[in-house]
Structures are given as C-alpha cells and as structure tokens.
Amino acid sequence: MQFTPQPSKNTGDSSTLQAKKEKKSRNCVTVLEKAQSMPGDMDYNSTNNISPEVELFQLIMYTPTFSLGLLFNVMALSFLFFKAKKLSEATVYMIALIFLDTLLLFTLPFKIISYHHPNKWKLGSVFCSILESLYFVNMYGSILISLCICIDRYIAIGHPFIAPTLRSTKKAAVVCAVICLGVSAGTVSTFQLHEKGHNISSCFHNFSKSTWENTALFSALQTTFFGSMTAMAFCTVQIVRCLRKRRKPDNPHTYATRAEKIVVANCITFLVCFTPYHVTFFLYFLVKNGIMLMAYQPKLRDILQITLCWANLNCCLDGVCYYFVLKESLESPLQKSERTARKNLDPHATFGDAFMKTGS
C-alpha cells in the first residue's frame, strides 16, 4: 500500500493568505495610480471621486450664481451704456470686469452638465478647451481688473495732484487691453490640460499629470492672486485713511462715509471669495506632487471643489455691487448735487473722481 502525502492544512492556508496579500497589494497600487492620474476640475479629480454632498453643493451654488450673476451684470452694463453720459476711468475698468465675469458665467451651465454626466462629453475637444480657457483664465483676468479698479481709486483719492497725469480713459483702456491680451495668451496652457492625442471625454476635470507638474503655471496663478490681494489690501487701507480725514464729525452720513463702505465691501468680497480657493489650491498642489501625504487628497479634493464654487460667487457679487453703485450714482439728483457742490469747493475732494465719476 503506497502512502500519498497529503498537503498540509497550514501550507494551504499560508498560500491562500499570501495570494490575498498580493491581490490587496495590487489593488492598492492600482488605486494609487488612478488617484495620481485623475486630477479634477482645477481640483483635478474625476467626478466619480467627488462626494454626493459636494455635487449637490455645486448644483445649489452654480444655479443662482449663473442666473443672478448674469442678471445683475447685464443690468450694470445697461446702466453704463445707456445712462452714463461719458466714460471715465472707473467705467472703463468696470466694463472690462463685467465682460470677463459674464464670459466666466457663460461656462457654468456646461460645467454643471459635465459634472452630472461624467465621461460623456460629446461637444468636442476644441469646444471643451475653449470653455476651460474662459473659465480658468477669465477668473484671473477678473482678479487683475479688480486690482486696477482699486489702484485707480487709490491714485485719485490719495494722490489728487498727480492723478490727472496718471489717470485717463485712454490709459485705462490700454491697461484693460493688455490684461485681456495677457489672459488670452494664457489660453495656450488650457489647451494642454489634458493628455495630448486623447479624445476628451470629461471636460473641466481629468487633467493630465503633466499639468500638476507644471510649477511655472502654478507659481504664476498663485503670484497673480496673492500679489493682487496684498496690493488691494494696501490700497484699501490708504483710501479709507484719506476718506476719514475728510469726514465731517457732525455728519456721519457724508459722501466719504458711503465711499468707505463701498471700498471696504469690495475688498472684503474679493478676499472672502478668492482666498479659500487659493489656499486650498496650494495645499492640493503639494499633495499631488508628493510633498504632503496622499491621505489628505480626498478631503482636499472636496474642499477645493467647494472653494472653487465659492470663488465663482464673486462674478455674481461684482454685478450686484456695481449695479447698485451705478444706480445710485446715475439716478440720484441729491447725490449729484452733493457731488457738484463738493467739486466746486475742491476738485479733488470727492470720491466721485475716483469711482463715482460715471454720472458726471
């Protein structure tokens, strides 16, 4: 009788355990590779990786941002084109800002569609790249125009004697043209967000790995924002100081006081809308390049989507702010008479020379 050795139970269990470990290891590597190669919407992720709560937040935010932003921007433009008797430096900058904001708003419906129908983009790669350029590039164009408006106010109010030399509608138009040409040149980078030679099936997300490794692009975007933020904060503080020197203690509702509120409100809106996104963008860039732990990626991805929605809210708030500013400036006879009286006493003492000059 021949004895046939039976395989040891322990040996079988060991082989099974080893196979499970190898399978689990392969799965972890696959997940890690996907996470590193699927950046999203400037938060560089696949829509499938966005939590349902964030998708709902996007829909809730983008719908009123688009509808109300478009409404107030169009109304502000109607005031500028049909009720302003002549262009001023402020009006030129405001027209450029509203134009850029409106172009960005135009992309939001397509962004919503792209997120709620992932991997089903059927409008072509070229149209997708055009939308992405309008979305990402015009955001920074709006930031730069907002900076120009703040600097223009600061020069007019803080340096009234050299203001006539530095400020003119032609110079404002040239500055706006340079900014528009500059951000248009930036569209070249948006045509390289996805892998070359691949058909785009997901617009506004699934960016290429090389996009994340582009340190020059990242540095340019961050420098544009944080440099603008610093300059705007400085100019706002100086404007408020100048206006408070001209405020009458016995009349808290002076023209200068209202001007202070407008200037401070614009600066706060800028900071509140754009700062959370750029801080999160910086942290997410560190994660994508292995400087921070990959464990932070899922949370930062969701936060980046939320803060990007919040940043887009600036397009709506700009339109609301400038609509009411223009409405008051162009339609209030009392305000016009007050501005005229102040101008007769001191040509450089009014806030109208800096911002509300559109109605004169």
Image (cartoon, rainbow, N blue to C red):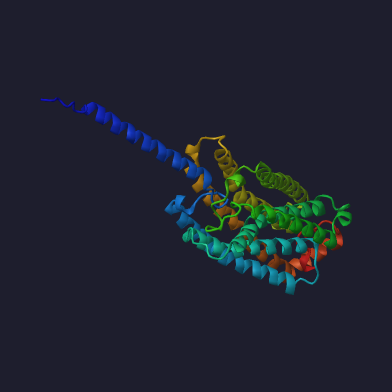
Q: Which residue is rendered at x = 78% and y = 54% of the image? A: 152
Q: Position of residue 356 (x, y in %)?
A: 75, 62
Provide residue 192's location: percent of width, then percent of height.
64, 52
Residue pictured at 54% horizontal, 52% vertical: 206
- Image point (77%, 54%), residue name: 153
Front residue of 59/343: it is 59
Image quarter in which the N terminus is found: top left
Residue 66: give x, y in percent of width and height. 57, 64
Q: Residue at x 61, y 47 (%)?
A: 211
Name the foreground residue: 248 vs 222.
Answer: 222
Residue 37 drawn above or below residue 255: above
Quarter that holds the C terminus:
bottom right
Res. 285 image quadrant? top right
Residue nearer the viewer, 306 or 298: 298
Residue 115 in view (yes/no): yes
Q: Position of residue 327 (x, y in %)?
A: 68, 68
- On screen, 118 above or below 297? below
Residue 351 visible in the displayed image? no
Left or right? Give the position of 108 relative to 341: left
